[in-house]
Image (tube, grey):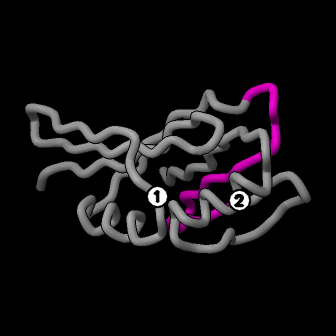
Amino acid sequence: MSLYLFAGIPVDDFDAALAWYGKLLGLDPSHFPNDIEAVWELAEGRLIYIVRRPEDAGHAMLTVIVEDLDALMASVTERGLEPAKQEAYSNGVRKTTYADPDGNEISFGEVPR
């Protein structure tokens, strides 16, 4: 069985969110399905998108697991964003959360090997 991900993040100001997610992810959107959506392919079959839906903006929470959290955080900081929260759990898992302009929480986690 193959699993794919297409996770949506509702935003209020599409242009501001487009710029912010470009800084967070360090890449341009993979495509624009229409004038109120932008899609980023993080890995094959794993996509996130922003969509202008002001009535739902600020309620998304998602976590992306990465191999090297420190490297990711350093690159995001270089692009001008700082984390809203950092956590370390007793099982060795670490998580860093960024809050977009609407308050959506986009986290990156690293699982010990």
Q: Is residue 26 left or right of residue 21?
A: left
Q: Residue at x 27, y 59 (%)?
A: 69
Q: Is residue 65 left or right of residue 17?
A: left
Q: Residue at x 79, y 46 (%)?
A: 13
Seen in the picture, residue 75 relative to 97 is either above or below; the reply is below
Q: Residue at x 51, y 50 (%)?
A: 3
Name which quarter of the figure residue 94 lies in. Answer: top left
Q: Which residue is mark 2?
A: 18
SS class, disc 2: helix
Sequence-wise, the earlier of marks 1 and 2 is 2
SS class, disc 1: loop
Q: Residue at x 17, y 38 (%)?
A: 88
| Residue 71 - label | none
Q: Is residue 35 left or right of residue 110?
A: right
Q: Is residue 22 magenta?
A: no
Seen in the picture, residue 41 relative to 36 is either above or below; the reply is below
Q: Position of residue 95 (x, y in %)?
A: 28, 43
Quadrant housing the C terminus: bottom left
Q: Decide: few, some or many residues near mark 1? Use Cα within 10 Å; few <14, some 14-19, many ≥20.
A: some
User: What secondary structure characterizes most of the magenta part?
Assistant: strand
Q: Position of residue 105 (x, y in %)?
A: 50, 37
Q: Position of residue 50 (x, y in %)?
A: 71, 49
Picture mark count:
2
Task: Give, as a single range, the part of the protein colored magenta.
Answer: 39-56
- Residues tagged 1 and 2 counted as in contact (Cβ below 8 A): no
Q: Decide: few, some or many residues near mark 2? Use Cα within 10 Å; few <14, some 14-19, many ≥20.
A: many
Q: Is residue 102 left or right of residue 26?
A: right
**Alpha-carbon span between mark 1 and mark 2:** 14 Å
Q: Position of residue 74 (x, y in %)?
A: 31, 67
| Residue 81 - label | 1
